[in-house]
């Protein structure tokens, strides 16, 4: 099954927000084991989620995995993103669209925080 991934960030008025997601995409792409990895933003930046999904569908993806680059399981994760994906699923009934967990309190993030602390000591 042809599969694409969208790394989905919040977005920002600061252009470097999308640049950071693009760097993460470039790190993930070689090891992801999928056709393509792209980025999208919830607000402020382009592409937004609908545009990114439309692009992947146009490229023939049969499955789209949306990876929310969000730390918290807040309103966007609980309500906004599921609503957006429900609409996209209605538009593309033949495409499987999967939402993964957000980043959350992962021990690997704690290791990064510890590394930052050590570098400041």
Image (cartoon, rainbow, N blue to C red):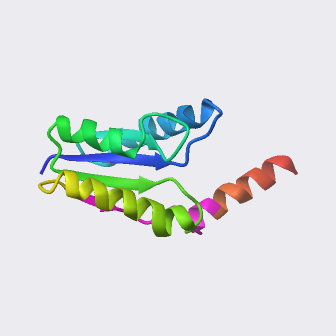
Is 86 placed above or below 88 here? below
Identify the residue shown where x is 47% and y is 67%: 79
Look at the image and say whether residue 97 sits in the magenta stretch. yes
Is 14 placed above or below 104 here? above
- The front one of 46 and 34 is 46
Answer yes or no: is residue 30 visible: no
Answer yes or no: is residue 99 visible: yes
- The front one of 71 and 30 is 71
User: How many dots with numbers?
Assistant: 0
Magenta span of residues: 96-109
Identify the residue shown where x is 34% and y is 38%: 51
Q: Position of residue 16 (x, y in %)?
A: 61, 31
Q: Position of residue 111 (x, y in %)?
A: 65, 60
Q: Position of residue 24 (x, y in %)?
A: 49, 40
- The front one of 87 and 115 is 87
Look at the image and say whether residue 28 sits in the magenta stretch. no
Give the quarter of the image for residue 59: top left
Identify the residue shown where x is 29% and y is 44%: 53
Question: On the picture, is 103 further left or further right than 15?
Answer: left
Identify the residue shown where x is 21% and y is 51%: 91
Q: Position of residue 97 (x, y in %)?
A: 25, 57
């Amino acid at each position: 099954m042809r599969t694409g991934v969208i790394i989905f960030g919040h977005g920002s008025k600061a252009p470097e927000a999308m640049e950071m997601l693009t760097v993460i995409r470039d790190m993930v792409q070689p090891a992801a084991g999928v056709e393509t990895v792209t980025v999208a933003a919830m607000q402020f930046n382009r592409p937004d989620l609908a545009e990114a999904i439309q692009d992947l569908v146009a490229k023939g993806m049969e499955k789209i995995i949306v990876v929310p680059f969000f730390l918290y399981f807040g309103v966007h994760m609980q309500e906004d993103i599921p609503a957006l994906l429900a609409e996209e699923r209605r538009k593309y009934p033949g495409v499987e669209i999967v939402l993964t967990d957000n980043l959350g309190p992962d021990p690997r993030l704690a290791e990064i925080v510890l590394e930052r602390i050590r570098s400041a000591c």
